[in-house]
Image (cartoon, rainbow, N blue to C red):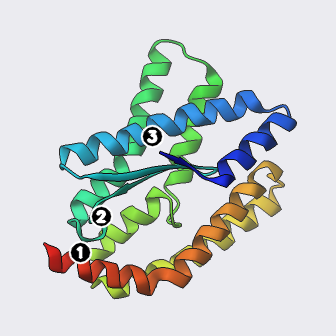
Amino acid sequence: MTIDFSFYFAFCLALFSRNLDVYLTYLIAILIHECGHLLVASLYKWEVESFKLTALGGFLTFKDDLAKPPLQSIGVALGGICFNGLFIVFLTLFEGPAALIYTQYAIIVFNLLPVTPLDGSKVFQGLLRFILDYRLTLRILKATNCVFLLLFTGAVVAFRWHSYMVVAIVLAVYVGKFSGTWPYLYERYLIQSDQK
């Protein structure tokens, strides 16, 4: 497991703004979410390469992930969201903390955005792969990333969600990185597909 600098930054920001309890609640939701991905991936016998903790959450990397069947990719992406949903049911039945329940809902909604590296982009990518080749899928995903990033950032500014500005900045970094590296991802996909 590796911990990204952005995680430390978000942790320090939460500590100095006296929102550490909110951040720890968020961290619990993230770990539950990643357990969902891990469980579904293990059902498909996917091999874990790494786990990285960032300000946006946890990111599991799997061996030959780009060449996996689209349906499996969609299943693994939705596994985290489903786990958060099951945890909401559990918390509701046992009258868990309202803040933790709210955080689960927030994680689900946020992760459904079709913006890299969120699960919504992986689901969208998997659906596109049923009808398009991988190169065109990546190009469409690049355009979709930009549109939804602009919409999210616009909503943050318009509704004065100041606490989400850091999230918008981190998302912008990931979208920029994806925009610059999608040709490399395509080459990786070709290599992984040839190894199958």
- Tell me which label, 3 or 1, sits earlier in the chain: 3
Write down the residue under mark 3.
Answer: 33
64 vs 14: above or below: below
Mark 3 lies on a secondary structure that is: helix
Horizontally, is 4 left or right of 139 in the view?
right
Q: Quadrant of residue 159?
A: bottom right
Q: Quadrant of residue 35?
A: top left
Mark 1 lies on a secondary structure that is: helix
Residue drawn at x 81%, y 62% as measured from the top left: 158
Residue drawn at x 72%, y 64% as measured from the top left: 169
Horizontally, is 49 left or right of 152 in the view?
left
Residue drawn at x 55%, y 44% as measured from the top left: 107
Mark 2 lies on a secondary structure that is: helix
Q: Dot 3: within a 10 Å radius of its alpha carbon, few (fewer than 14), some, or many (20 or more) residues?
A: many
Q: Residue 124, which numbered label?
A: none
- Tell me which label, 2 or 3, sits earlier in the chain: 3
**Residue 130 horizontal/vertical position (percent):** 23, 74
Question: Is residue 143 visible to the viewer in this orientation of the structure?
Answer: no
| CB-based contact (under 8 Å), mark 1 and mark 2 | yes
